[in-house]
Amino acid sequence: MSAPKKVVLAYSGGLDTSIILKWLQAEYGCEVVTFTADLGQGEELEPARAKAEMLGVKEIHIEDLREEFVRDFVFPMFRANALYEGLYLLGTSIARPLISKRLVEIAAATGADAVAHGATGKGNDQVRFELAAYALNPDIKVIAPWRLWDLTSRTKLIDFAEKNQIPIAKDKRGEAPFSVDANLLHTSSEGKVLENPAEQAPDYVLQRTVPVEQAPNEPEYIEITFEKGDAVAINGEAMSPATILTKLNELGGKHGIGVLDLVENRFVGMKSRGVYETPGGTVLLEAHRGIEQITLDSGAGHLKDSIMPRYAELIYNGFWFSPEREMLQALIDKSQEHVSGTVRLKLYKGSARTVARWSDHSLYSEAHVTFEDDAGAYDQQDAAGFIQLNALRLKLLAARNRRLKG
């Protein structure tokens, strides 16, 4: 790859991406444009601007993408009830395509010929960033310094920072107890004290969820209203997508909901252990399942559930912008046309449980299911023929097997 002339860097303002910024300038003699996204990670972003200015950056982009993140990425994923390996709500995975999208768009707007990210060569994020970038611009150059440089230890990183007058916070001089990635959907903690899956994760790892033992001793009931599969209101109050997820994070976190200790299979082939906190997403998933119970046809629902693992895997592996993900999304979105109504949930000691649900689009018929007189709504004698037809092939198999034995 020829040396880039201008690079758009995904920049957090932290030590690692500041080192990357300076390394790009030194290694390639190129101009660096920084892009910092507010995805609801809960950190002040203006210090990133100040640090980028200090490092000589002329073009600095800081954008609030919270609404776009939830509306165009999180909510479509939740229509699918997506869970990777049956458990993980994909909080890190779903943020990467949006960051890559903006990197590529800013590169086009500023005349940059390359983008750069701070993902390491061991993880999934390098794959997600780069697959998304190439899907949106096949000619873009992608620079991944962690795969290129010789700064292979914390000591070497600190030495590089000191030699280049990059400020180092006191807590960055020692080894951090674990690594954190956060956005509005979740907090992910990995590494160091969490690397041994035989050791219980310490409570101090939790950042947005209280330990369940410290959750309130009284349950809290909330109502979430949906329109076509997306949450639109909490307790009757209409809210924007990002505001809804923020409120659900607050409610779920207070009750110790949404903590997952997972050993997962990374796309690059290794297993890794992480502690994920997804309080609002866990509540939202339970509520969405609750409203689908009465509004979604059984055939549609079972088909949707059967494709969910494939859909989740595509997102985890970085194929958000692939045609197969878009095809599955079209199927999923079609299934949500009547997924509208309200769900009441009980939040208590680490759990979010559906306790009631109602909808003008409901398929539930009390007349058919009642244990009382159904006034002719359902003829129970019809079940005899239904059973006989479904039993026919089983009878033929059993007769064949008996004949062969005898």
Image (cartoon, grey):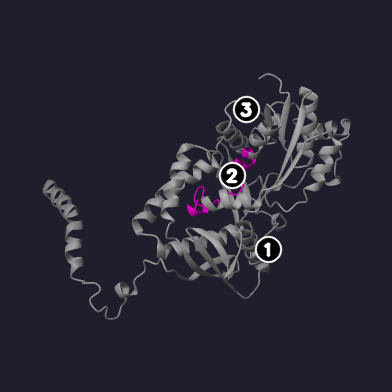
Q: Position of residue 44 (x, y in %)?
A: 78, 51
- Name the foreground residue: 169 vs 132: 132
Q: Residue at x 50, y 37 (%)?
A: 322
Across and down, in percent, residue 232 comes to 55, 62
Q: Is residue 92 left or right of residue 337?
A: right
Q: Which of the marked residues, 2 or 1, is nearer the chain's N terminus?
A: 2
Q: Mark 2 Cα within 10 Å, few/some/many (few <14, many 20+)?
A: many
Mark 3, mark 1: which one is toward the viewer?
A: 3
Provide residue 58's location: percent of width, then percent of height: 81, 34
Mark 3 vs mark 2, foreground winner is 3
The N terminus lies in quadrant: top right
Q: Are marks 2 and 1 in contact (CB under 8 Å)?
A: no
Is 112 rendered above or below residue 262?
A: above
| Residue at 66% from the left image edge and 69% from the top image edge | 215
**Amino acid type, label 3:** Ile
The amino acid pointed to by label 1 is: Val
Tell me: residue 176, above or below residue 269.
below
* SS class, disc 2: helix
Query: What is the magenta range?
Result: 78-101
Residue at the far front: name it: 109
3D distance between C-alphas at marks 3 and 1: 43 Å
Amino acid beneath label 2: Ser
Label 3, label 2: how far apart the Cα atoms are: 21 Å
- Residue on which disc 1 sits: 210
* Secondary structure at numbered mark 3: loop
Q: Is residue 290 above or below residue 134?
A: below
**Please, what secondary structure does the residue beneath circle 1 have?**
loop
Q: Quadrant of residue 209?
A: bottom right
Q: Are marks 3 and 2 in contact (CB under 8 Å)?
A: no
Q: Give the residue pinned by disc 3.
A: 140
Residue that badge 2 annotates: 93
Up/down of 164 relative to 381, above or below? above
